[in-house]
Image (cartoon, rainbow, N blue to C red):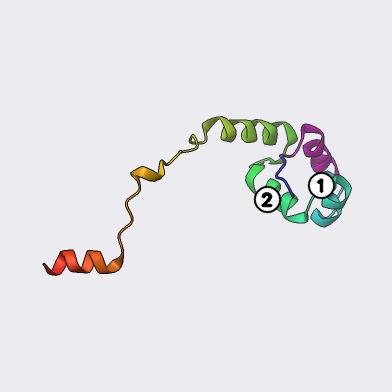
């Protein structure tokens, strides 16, 4: 299953249903995501004043903008040594 980020509407639904007292599993069913997605969302984006969907959207956007770039490793730059060659080098 491909990875998809939560939408603004899904975050609003989480906020709204959480405020009404729905369980995390029930919220997940309503927005059609796995319950771990809702748990993760609430863990990552709950501030001192609770879960707020606008704040959650901003925090997510900020994390996405500040993440490190993907590193492309050229296989020619990678040197692989067997434990035997390292041992032989040390004992010589």
Q: Residues within 10 Å of mark 1 (few under 14, many from 20)?
A: some
Which of label 2 and label 1 is nearer to you?
2
x and y, in percent, of residue 36 in the image: 72, 55
- Magenta part of the chain: 5-17
User: In the rendered image, which residue does mark 2 sit on?
Assistant: 40
User: Which residue corresponds to mark 1?
Assistant: 18
Closer to the chain start, of discs 2 and 1, is 1
What number of labels is visible?
2
Q: Residue at x 32, y 51 (%)?
A: 79
Relative to 49, is 27 on the left or the right?
A: right
On screen, residue 83 versus residue 72, left or right, reads: left
**Which residue is more in the foreground, 20 or 6?**
6
Quadrant of residue 14 within the rendered picture: top right
* Residue in the foreground of this view, choosing between 30 and 51: 30
Residue at the spot x=80%, y=54% of the render? 24
Residue drawn at the location 21% of the way across and 69% of the way down: 87
Q: Residue furthest front?
A: 76
List x then y, in percent, for residue 2.
72, 46
- Where 42 falls versus 71 (above or below)? below
Classified by dominant secondary structure, the portion drawn in magenta counts as helix
């Amino acid at each position: 299953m491909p990875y998809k980020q939560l939408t603004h509407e899904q975050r609003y639904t989480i906020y709204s249903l959480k405020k009404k007292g729905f369980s995390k599993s029930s919220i997940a069913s309503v927005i059609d995501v796995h319950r771990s997605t809702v748990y993760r969302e609430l863990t990552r984006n709950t501030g001192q004043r609770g879960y707020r969907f606008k704040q959650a959207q901003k925090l997510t956007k900020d994390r996405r903008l500040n993440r490190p770039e993907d590193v492309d490793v050229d296989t020619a730059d990678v040197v692989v040594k067997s434990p035997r060659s390292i041992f032989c080098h040390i004992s010589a």
